[in-house]
Image (cartoon, helix red, strand yellow):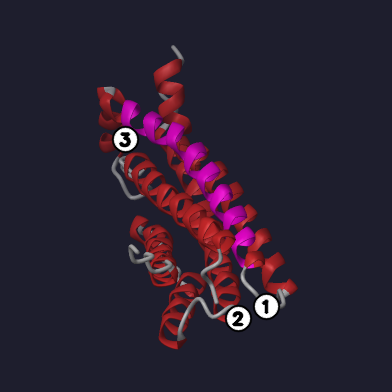
C-alpha cells in the first residue's frame, strides 16, 4: 500500500529532515541553555558573561537555531508531500493545524532563543558594559516564556495534528498513536520551565522517523532472483 516509488522517496526526505532537525535543535539548545537561568545568582551571571567562554557557547548555539528551524520547515513540507502521496482522502483540518502550529513553533523558537542570547551577543560584539543582571534575567524570562509556554504548546499541537494525519493513513498503529497523543498532551498541559521539556519534541520526532523507516524497509521490493 505504501510502497510506491513516490511514497518511498518522500519517506526518506521526511526522515532525513526530521533527524537533521532533531540533531541541530538539541545541540543548539544545549549550548544556549548554558546561561545561569532566572534562578542564578548575580555572581553567577557576572562570572558567566565575564569569562568569555559562556558568550562563545551561547553565540554558537544561537547561530545553529536558524538551521534547526530551516530543517524543521523542510521536514514539515516533506511530511505534507508524503501524506499527499499516500492513498486516501486528506483531512483538511489536521493538515492546516499542522502547518500553522509548525510555523508558530518556529517563530517562537527564533524569538525566544534570540532573547535568551541577547546579553551574550551584546557582550561579545559590543564594547558596552554588561547590562544589569536584572535586565539580563528579564530578557531570559521573555525567551523562556516564548519557548516554554508558547513554543512548547505549538509543538504539542503539531504533534496532535501529525499523529491524526499519520493514523488516518495507516502509518501509525493504535499503540503508537496512543503514545504520541499522550506525549503531545503532556506538552500541552506542562507548566515546567526546565529545559528538558523542550527535548521531548525532538525525541518524539526521532521515534516517528524510525516508524516511517520501518514502513520503508517493509515496503522495499524483494530482489529479483537471477535467471
**Residue at position x 45%, y 75% in the image:** 186
**Residue corresponding to mark 2:** 168
- Would residue 104 be seen by someone viewing this image from the given angle? yes
Q: Give the percent coordinates (x, y) of residue 99.
A: 66, 60
Q: Nearer the viewer, mark 3 or mark 1?
A: 1
Residues at marks 3 and 1, CA–CA distance in whole angstroms: 55 Å
**Residue corresponding to mark 1:** 88
Q: Secondary structure at mark 3?
A: helix
Quarter holding the N terminus?
A: bottom right
Instruction: Classify 212 as above or below 131.
Output: below
Of marks 3 and 1, which one's residue comes earlier in the chain? 3
Residues at marks 2 and 3, CA–CA distance in whole angstroms: 50 Å
Q: Pointers 2 and 1 in contact (CB under 8 A)? A: yes
Q: State the extent of the magenta-drawn residues as a range.
A: 55-83
From the viewer's perspective, tell me whether residue 102 is left or right of residue 223.
right
Q: Give the percent coordinates (x, y) of residue 159.
A: 53, 69
Q: Residues within 10 Å of mark 2 (few under 14, many from 20)?
A: some
Quarter holding the C terminus?
A: bottom left
Amino acid at each position: 500500500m505504501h510502497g510506491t516509488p513516490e511514497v518511498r522517496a518522500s519517506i526518506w526526505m521526511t526522515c532525513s529532515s526530521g533527524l537533521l532537525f532533531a540533531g541541530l535543535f538539541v545541540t543548539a539548545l544545549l549550548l544556549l541553555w548554558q546561561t545561569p537561568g532566572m534562578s542564578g545568582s548575580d555572581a553567577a551571571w557576572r562570572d558567566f558573561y565575564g569569562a568569555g567562554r559562556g558568550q562563545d557557547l551561547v553565540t554558537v548555539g544561537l547561530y545553529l537555531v536558524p538551521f534547526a528551524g530551516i530543517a524543521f520547515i523542510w521536514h514539515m513540507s516533506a511530511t505534507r508531500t508524503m501524506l499527499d502521496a499516500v492513498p486516501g482522502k486528506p483531512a483538511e483540518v489536521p493538515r492546516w493545524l499542522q502547518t500553522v502550529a509548525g510555523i508558530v513553533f518556529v517563530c517562537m523558537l527564533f524569538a525566544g532563543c534570540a532573547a535568551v542570547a541577547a546579553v551574550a551577543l551584546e557582550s561579545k560584539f559590543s564594547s558596552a558594559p554588561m547590562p544589569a543582571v536584572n535586565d539580563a534575567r528579564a530578557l531570559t524570562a521573555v525567551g523562556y516564556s516564548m519557548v516554554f509556554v508558547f513554543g512548547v504548546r505549538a509543538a504539542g499541537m503539531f504533534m496532535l495534528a501529525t499523529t491524526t494525519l499519520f493514523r488516518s493513513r495507516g502509518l501509525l498503529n493504535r499503540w503508537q498513536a496512543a503514545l504520541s497523543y499522550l506525549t503531545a498532551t503532556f506538552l500541552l498541559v506542562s507548566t515546567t520551565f526546565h529545559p528538558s521539556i523542550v527535548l521531548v519534541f525532538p525525541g518524539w520526532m526521532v521515534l516517528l522517523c524510525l516508524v516511517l523507516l520501518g514502513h520503508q524497509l517493509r515496503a522495499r521490493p524483494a530482489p529479483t532472483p537471477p535467471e
